[in-house]
């Protein structure tokens, strides 16, 4: 049985974040402060592997927030992110987590992407995030895009996923060479959450 979170802290809205990815929690927590309080799934007493069964980011984000809303009845948000590479017809896209197989192995995904891009002149790419917010039982979607390019070699140790091979436009560093604040100044996830924050402020 999930714990209920019906009280307000600091007079700010309380939202459950429907993810088990602690990197995402840390990134969003660093921008949410002052706007809303995040309850992690762990803190809500929920221990499930949330499925991502659909072939769009929007449908997967909706699925994640809906599952947790049905379990708790609480206000909740989720996000789904994909790395979209035009030279690979938009891949890995919605399949970014499992690009190299069900193991969801970050290094194997990077190796596969670099191999598939070998010899291709266009190394442009974008991260796209869809945030699904369920507030008082109604769903709202927010999008964030970060354009950039894929490096030839991986660099940096911060972050997660494809961060070591992605340089956002306007920088010469990969996301994995940046502090969280630097990454947030460019990031798709920050942009999508900024939409949610603006909406909550209305
Ligand atoms: P998810 O399905 O939204 O959990 O994310 C799909 C996959 O995209 C993750 O497993 C990561 O490999 C990758 N990904 C998502 N966000 C980022 C990011 O900010 N940096 C690098 N990779 C990311």
Image (tube, helix red, strand yellow):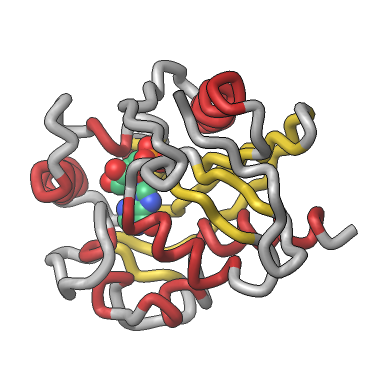
Percent position of residue 145, x then y: 56, 55
Percent position of residue 5, x then y: 61, 43
Question: How many tags in the picture?
Answer: 0
Q: Nearer the viewer, residue 98 or 74?
A: 74
Which residue is rendered at x = 33% and y = 31% of the image?
47
**Can I make out residue 140 in this image?**
yes
Drawn side of residue 22 relative to residue 187, left or right: left
Quarter in which the N terminus is drawn: top left
Drawn side of residue 94 relative to residue 3, left or right: left
Which residue is rendered at x = 53% and y = 28% of the image?
68
Percent position of residue 78, x then y: 54, 40
Q: Is residue 114 above or below residue 9?
A: above
Q: Is residue 106 above or below residue 140?
A: below
**Can I make out residue 122 in this image?**
no
Which residue is rendered at x = 70% and y = 69% of the image?
10
Residue sitting farthest toward the right: 202
Drawn side of residue 188 relative to residue 86, left or right: right
Percent position of residue 162, x then y: 26, 55
Q: Nearer the viewer, residue 191 or 127?
A: 191
Quarter in which the C terminus is drawn: bottom right
């Amino acid at each position: 049985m999930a714990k209920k979170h019906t009280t307000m802290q600091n007079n700010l809205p309380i939202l459950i974040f429907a993810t088990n990815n602690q990197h995402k929690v840390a990134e969003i927590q660093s921008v949410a402060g002052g706007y809303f309080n995040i309850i992690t799934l762990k803190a809500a007493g929920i221990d499930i592997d949330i499925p991502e069964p659909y072939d769009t980011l929007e449908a997967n984000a909706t699925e994640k927030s809906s599952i947790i809303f049905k379990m708790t009845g609480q206000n909740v948000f989720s996000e789904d992110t994909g790395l979209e590479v035009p030279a690979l017809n938009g891949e890995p896209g919605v399949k970014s987590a499992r690009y190299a197989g069900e193991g969801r192995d970050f290094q194997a995904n990077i190796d596969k992407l670099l191999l598939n891009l070998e010899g291709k002149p266009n190394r442009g790419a974008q991260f796209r995030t869809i945030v699904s917010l369920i507030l008082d039982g109604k769903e709202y979607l927010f999008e964030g895009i970060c354009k950039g390019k894929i490096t030839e070699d991986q660099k940096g140790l911060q972050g997660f996923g494809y961060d070591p091979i992605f340089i956002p436009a306007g920088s010469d560093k990969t996301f994995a060479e940046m502090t969280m604040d630097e990454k947030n100044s460019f990031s798709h996830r920050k942009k999508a959450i900024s939409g949610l924050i603006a909406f909550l402020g209305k």
